[in-house]
Amino acid sequence: MFNASIRGWLNYYGHFYKSQLYPVFRHMNLALVKWARRKYKKLERHKIRAIKWLGRLARNLPKLFVHWQLGILPAAG
């Protein structure tokens, strides 16, 4: 659902100034952490645990999101 948009941003904006996309992708990782905290009750009160959970997910499934394929991963858990 999101990969098409992320890939489009990367192709368009990355052509001119790729390094300026890194903060955007880090923000997307934080948005994924917020989503996980809402979705999974065991992570609701544990921000660090949610970040580590997302890091383990990124390590196990590195091709899930386009920006993870570039190496912009959440903190490894």
Image (cartoon, rainbow, N blue to C red):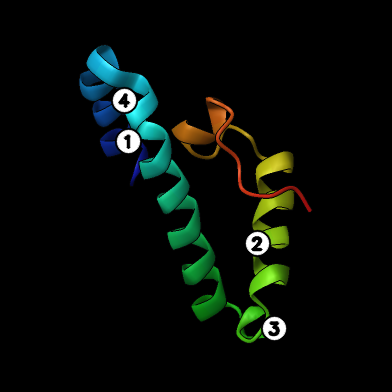
Answer whether labels 3 and 4 touch (C-beta < 8 Å). Answer: no
Label disc, if present, on residue 10 of the rendered structure: 4
Q: Relative to residue 25, is residue 51 drawn left or right?
A: right
Helix, strand or loop under label 3: helix
Q: Which residue in the rendered view is the most extreme toward the top?
A: 15
Indicate the amino acid at tag 4: Leu
Residue under pointer 2? 51
The crowding category of the residue bearing disc 4, from other C-alpha atoms within 10 Å (few below 14, some 14 to 19, many at least 20), is some
State which tag comes first along the sequence, 3 or 2: 3
Kind of element beneath mark 2: helix
Nearer to us: label 3 or label 4: 4
* SS type, badge 4: helix
Occupied quadrant, residue 64: top right
- Work out whether residue 49 or residue 60 is closer to the camera in this orientation and state it: 49
Q: Do the residues labelled 4 and 1 touch (CB within 8 Å)?
A: yes
Rate crowding at label 2 as few (under 14), some (14 to 19) or many (20 or more) other CA atoms within 10 Å: many
Q: Which residue is drawn at 55% across and 27% down?
A: 69
Inspect the image, locate mark 3, and give the three-letter code of the amino acid beneath it: Lys
Q: Mark 1 points at which residue?
A: 6
Work out whether residue 25 or residue 61 is closer to the camera in this orientation and state it. Answer: 25
Crowd band around label 1 with a 10 angstrom C-alpha radius: few (<14), some (14–19), many (20+): some
Q: How far apart are marks 2 and 1 (CA)?
A: 21 Å
